[in-house]
Image: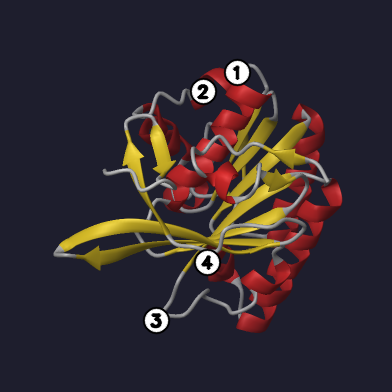
Amino acid sequence: MERIKTGIPGLDEILGGGVPQGTNVLIVGGTGTGKTIFCSQFLYKGVEDYNQNGIFVTLEERAEDLRREMMKFGWDFAKYEKENRLAIIDGTSAKLRKRAVKEKYSLIGMDIDALIIEINRISKEINAKRVVIDSIPSLGLNLDSEKEVRRSIYRLSALLLEIGVTSFVTTETLDGGFSRYGVEEFVSRGVIKMDIVERENKFVRTIYVRKMRETDFAMEKYPFGIESDGIKIYTRGEVF
C-alpha cells in the first residue's frame, strides 16, 4: 500500500506515515473547528511540497473569499491556478449573485450529476491527485429528501474512489451526533473528527482519527492549533 503525505504536521505520524493513496476521508466537525483550513492545507501542500495537483470544490463560500482567507497562511492558490496545478470549482457565487461568475470552473446550482461530471473532467485536465469537497450539507439543499441526499453521497463517494484521487470531504455535526445524514461515515474509507472542547476554563481544539482502512493508527484525541502557517497537531505533549 502506498501512502501520501498530508502536509499537516502531526497527522502523518498519527497515521503511521500518511493517508492511504486513493482513499476518501470524511472530515467531521462543528462550526469553527477548522475543517476548511485543514482541507486547504492538505490540498495546497500537496501541490507545493509533493507535486500532486488538486481540486477544491467550494460549496459554502465564494472562490474569491477562499483565496483571500488562505493567503493569511501564505497559501497562494491563484499562483497554482494559473499554472494549472490547482483548480477551484465555485459552487457558491452563482447561487448568491444569481448571475454568471468570472471563474474558470463554476457550477450553476447544486446538481450532483453536474458536480460529478465536472470533477471527473477537471481531474483529467490537470492530472489531479487530490480533491477537497467543502461541504456535504450544501449538496443537500436542493434535494427533496434525506434518501436522495444519501444516494447522492454514495454516488459521489464511489466516483472519487473510481477515479483514484485521494479526497477529503467535509460535513457538519448535528445535535451531538456524528454526521448530519448518518451515512457519510459508512461510505468513507477514513473518518477524522475535529472538535472544540472546554478544559480548565479555556477552549481547546482537538482531533482524532475514528476510522482509516488499510492502516493502523493511534486512536487518541490530540490537541491542535491554527498557527500563522496552518494547522499543527500536537502529538508529543507540546504546550500551545
- Structural distance between the alpha carbons of marks 4 and 3: 14 Å
On the question of residue 32 being in view, the answer is no
Query: What amino acid is at disc 3?
Result: Asp
Q: Is residue 229 above or below residue 191?
A: above
Label 2 with label 1: CB-CB less than 8 Å? yes
Query: What amino acid is at disc 2?
Result: Ala
Nearer-the-camera pick, 97 or 164? 164
User: Which numbered dot is residue 137?
Assistant: 4
**According to the image, label 1 marks what residue?**
82
Secondary element under disc 3, as helix, strand or loop, is loop
Percent x, y of residue 2? 80, 41
Q: Residue furthest front?
A: 236
Percent x, y of residue 216? 69, 57
Q: Residue furthest left?
A: 201
What is the quadrant of residue 100 in the picture?
top right
Q: Quadrant of the C terminus?
A: top left
Q: Comparing marks 4 and 3, which lies closer to the viewer?
A: 3
User: Could you classify mark 1 by the number of other residues whose Cα lies within 10 Å: few (under 14), some (14-19), or many (20 or more)?
Assistant: few
**According to the image, label 2 marks what residue?**
78
Q: Earlier in the sequence, mark 2 or mark 4?
A: 2
Secondary element under disc 1, as helix, strand or loop, is helix
- Structural distance between the alpha carbons of marks 4 and 1: 30 Å
Query: What amino acid is at disc 1?
Result: Lys
User: Which numbered dot is residue 175?
Assistant: 3
- Structural distance between the alpha carbons of marks 2 and 1: 6 Å
User: Could you classify mark 3 by the number of other residues whose Cα lies within 10 Å: few (under 14), some (14-19), or many (20 or more)?
Assistant: few
- Structural distance between the alpha carbons of marks 3 and 1: 41 Å
Secondary element under disc 4, as helix, strand or loop, is helix
What is the quadrant of residue 130 in the picture?
top right
Label 3 with label 2: CB-CB less than 8 Å? no
